Amino acid sequence: MVNAPSRQQILRLYGSTLRAARSFSSYNFRNYFVRRTRENFRNMQVEQDSGKLSHAYGEAVKELAVLRRSAMVNQLYGGWRLVVENQSEVRERGEN
């Protein structure tokens, strides 16, 4: 019998994965990984079988390591900010 992860372990992993997903400098990657993380953990939330839950948890731990490495590379080689991203307003000369 496989021992299922506790609720606190899953929530801690969820928070870490979301934090890693939000650290991407690229808008498209960031939104994709946040959406994917939420979807994966929603699927884990409704899972009743402890074996499948343990397997999904293990896969999520592996994905977190990959996500952290990918985010680091993306931050090093990030491009320009997109128009759809929140940007600070640029003030023109003569505006108060």
Image: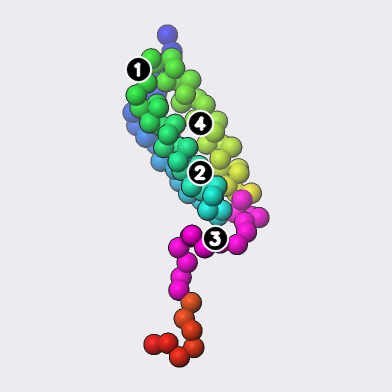
Q: Badge 2, how many Cα within 10 Å: few under 14, some, many 20+? A: few
Q: Name which of mark 3 and mark 1 comes first in the sequence.
A: 1
Question: Which mark, by number, is residue 48?
Answer: 1
Residue stretch in magenta: 74-89
Q: Residue at x 45, y 41 (%)?
A: 35
Q: Name which of mark 1 and mark 2 comes first in the sequence.
A: 2
Q: Residue at x 44, y 31 (%)?
A: 40
Say if 54 sits above or below 64 in the image. Answer: above
* Residue 78 as seen in the image, left or right of residue 19: right
Q: Secondary structure at mark 2?
A: helix
The x, y position of residue 16, in whole percent, is 45, 41
Q: Name which of mark 3 and mark 2 comes first in the sequence.
A: 2
Q: Nearer the viewer, mark 1 or mark 2?
A: 2
Q: Quadrant of the C terminus?
A: bottom left
- Residue designated by label 2: 32
Whole-number angstrom distance, CA of label 3 to CA of label 1: 41 Å
Give residue 10's quadrant in the image.
Answer: top left
- Residue designated by label 4: 61
Say if 77 sits above or below 49 in the image. Answer: below
Q: Badge 4, how many Cα within 10 Å: few under 14, some, many 20+? A: some
* Amino acid type at mark 3: Leu
Q: Name which of mark 4 and mark 3 comes first in the sequence.
A: 4
Q: Badge 1, how many Cα within 10 Å: few under 14, some, many 20+? A: few
Say if 56 sits above or below 49 in the image. Answer: below
Whole-number angstrom distance, CA of label 3 to CA of label 2: 15 Å
Q: Nearer the viewer, mark 2 or mark 4?
A: 2
* Amino acid type at mark 4: Val
Q: Secondary structure at mark 4?
A: helix
The answer to which of 4 and 71 lies nearer the viewer is 71
